[in-house]
Each structure stands twice: as C-alpha cells, then as structure tokens.
Image (spheres, rainbow, N blue to C red):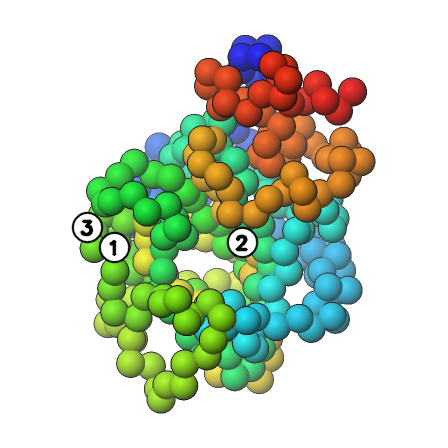
C-alpha cells in the first residue's frame, strides 16, 4: 500500500529542457518562486492546439454560460474534462506544468480542477481571487496549489488576458479590494468601469500555445473582453495530496475511461497514495481496483 509498491515517476529535467531557454530547472523555479508566476511560449504546437479545439467544439457549441460574476455570464466553462477526451488528460500531465506542481506540492499532488474558460466579447473582469482561497488556512503558509493556464487562443490586452499581482503569494492579506463575495458566484453586480483595477497588475499577454504557471496564493483575475472575438484558455489546477480537490473526478469520469488513461493521469485524479497511506481502498492501493 506504500508508494514504494506503486512508485510515481517524477518529471525529469531532460524532459522539459527544450522549454527552459537554456536555464536549468532550478533557475526557472527561482523566478517562479520569487514572483509567483512564470510563462513559457511555444509549448504547444498548432497540431496539438487543433486537437484541443476539435475536442472542445461540441461542448462549446452547447453555449452554457456562467452563473455569476465569478464564472462570467458571457463565458463558457467546460468541466469534467478528464471524461471528455484523452487530449485533456495529456494536457494535465504535461511535463512542464507537472515539474512545477511536483516541486511545490510533492509527487503525491492531485489534480484539483481542470476546466476550459471561453470569454465572449463583452465579458467583464472577474473578482480578484487566488485559487486556494477555499482552503481557509491563514497566511503565510506552505504551497497548497499550483495553477496552470494554457493559452488556446492568443491572450491580449483587449480580449481578457489573465491579470495577476506579482509577489502577492507572499502577502499576509487574505482579502483585498475587489475580492469575491457570496453574491459573486450566483449573481451579477452592475458596475461602471473597473473600480478594482490596480496599477501593480500585470496582464498575461501570450500567443496561443503558451503556458503560464501561478502559485496558488497569487491574486489574479480574468480580464474584460473588449474585443470582437472570444478567447479560450484551459486551466489544470493541482493541489497537495491530502487536500480535497475542487472537482470530483472520480465521480465525473467513467471507470472504463480511467482504465485507458495514462498512469500519471490516473494518479492525479486519486488512483495514488499520499504517504503513508492516505487514499487506500479496502486496505490496498486504488490502482488495484481497476483489475
């Protein structure tokens, strides 16, 4: 039942060297650790982007919009993506994103959420938030979550590029102006302009195929889409192995689909053990239940 019986293979530096721009992983990690963010361009090629867009198309055609300011009433959000196509499982286990998740959260990290976010023209800014806001533990604290942002379209100043506050993972404040309220999740607040805009915010302008990684305590928000076209990102979010994920992948994903997943993808949704034995099934490693 221990990890030794079903070892999780860590990402190797040689598997990600081509994206590090001549740096070592340790050097790249120092930038990420200091600012709370790091970006890489040219990680996904056009073939991979086309496969992702094709897999998403039927779910975007359903045109299901968000329920409030947080999800966005002019935004499509696609959930339960591990059940929808293996291209999304492959994205969740991409070695470049996983290298930073494993470094912050350990090999037993879990996938907390995996969703596509498609902002339509006219969408307004999201409330400022950090992705481990739900944990309720006081700052400062050890990392609990890492969020990856894959640009499936170009993200620009005008179409709603994610805005983030560099270094905010080191702040002690657990509330800032413009943070979500209870009404943010299931309601719309009529506001004029952008009263919560901040001069220290950076817009993550990236070409399609880029990857941004944010520490879970970094304050950020989706920008307003003032363009005439939609913009889409996919965000896998990882958490420590002992923390309950935001999304219940074990109920959302049929077991036949899970059997066909890569081993690392199964581990990320709960077919793994957090030391010494958190996550066992009938006293055994959960992978044994797949027969």
Does label 2 or label 3 sit earlier along the sequence? 3
In the image, residue 265 lies at what x, y percent? 64, 35
Q: Say whether residue 80 is left or right of residue 159.
A: right
Q: Mark 2 points at which residue?
A: 235
Q: Is mark 1 on a helix, strand or loop?
A: loop
- Using the image, determine if residue 217 lies above or below residue 123: above
Residue lying at 64% horizontally and 17% vertically, measured from the top left: 282
Give yes or no for contact between labels 1 and 3 (Cβ–Cβ under 8 Å): yes
**Residue 102 visible in the picture:** no
Label 2 or label 1, whichever lies nearer to me, is: 1
In the image, residue 10 lies at what x, y percent? 52, 25
Depth check, front residue: 84 or 279: 279
Q: Which mark is residue 174?
A: 1
Give the total of numbered labels. 3
- Using the image, determine if residue 175 lies above or below residue 237: below
In the image, residue 168 lies at what x, y percent? 26, 54
For label 3, the crowd category at 10 Å Cα-Cα, with few meaning under 14, some 14 to 19 and many 20 or more, is few
In the image, residue 52 lies at what x, y percent? 70, 56
Q: What element carries label 2?
A: strand
Give yes or no for contact between labels 2 and 1 (Cβ–Cβ under 8 Å): no
Residue lying at 72% horizontally and 22% vertically, measured from the top left: 289
Q: In which quarter of the image is residue 191?
A: bottom left
Q: Name the residue under label 3.
A: 172
For label 1, the crowd category at 10 Å Cα-Cα, with few meaning under 14, some 14 to 19 and many 20 or more, is some
Image quadrant in which the C terminus is located: top right
- Which residue ends up furthest to the left in the rendered image? 172
- Compute the Cα span from label 2 to label 1: 23 Å
Does label 2 or label 1 sit earlier along the sequence? 1
Depth check, front residue: 269 or 134: 134
Depth check, front residue: 281 or 73: 281
- Compute the Cα span from label 2 to label 3: 25 Å
- Which residue ends up furthest to the bottom in the rendered image? 192
């Amino acid at each position: 039942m221990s990890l030794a019986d079903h070892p999780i293979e860590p990402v190797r530096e040689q598997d990600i060297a081509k994206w590090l721009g001549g740096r070592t992983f340790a050097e790249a990690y120092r930038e990420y650790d200091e600012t709370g963010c790091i970006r890489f361009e040219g990680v996904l090629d056009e073939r991979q982007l086309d496969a992702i867009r094709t897999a998403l198309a039927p779910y975007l055609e359903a045109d299901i919009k968000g329920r409030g300011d947080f999800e966005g009433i002019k935004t499509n959000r696609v959930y339960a993506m591990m059940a929808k196509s293996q291209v999304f499982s492959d994205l969740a286990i991409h070695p470049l994103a996983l290298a930073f998740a494993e470094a912050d959260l350990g090999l037993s990290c879990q996938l907390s959420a995996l969703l596509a976010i498609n902002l339509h023209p006219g969408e307004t800014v999201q409330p400022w938030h950090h992705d481990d806001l739900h944990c309720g533990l006081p700052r400062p604290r050890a990392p609990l979550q890492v969020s990856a942002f894959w640009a499936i379209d170009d993200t620009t100043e005008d179409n709603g590029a994610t805005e983030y506050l560099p270094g905010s993972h080191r702040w002690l404040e657990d509330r800032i102006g413009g943070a979500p309220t209870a009404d943010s999740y299931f309601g719309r607040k009529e506001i004029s302009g952008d009263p919560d805009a901040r001069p220290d915010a950076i817009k993550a302008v990236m070409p399609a195929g880029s990857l941004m990684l944010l520490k879970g305590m970094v304050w950020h928000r989706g920008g307003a889409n003032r363009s005439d076209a939609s913009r889409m990102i996919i965000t896998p979010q990882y958490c420590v192995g002992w923390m309950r994920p935001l999304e219940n992948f074990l109920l959302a994903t049929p077991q036949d689909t899970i059997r066909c997943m890569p081993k690392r993808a199964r581990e990320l949704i709960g077919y793994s053990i957090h030391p010494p034995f958190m996550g066992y099934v009938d006293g055994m490693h959960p992978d044994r239940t797949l027969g």
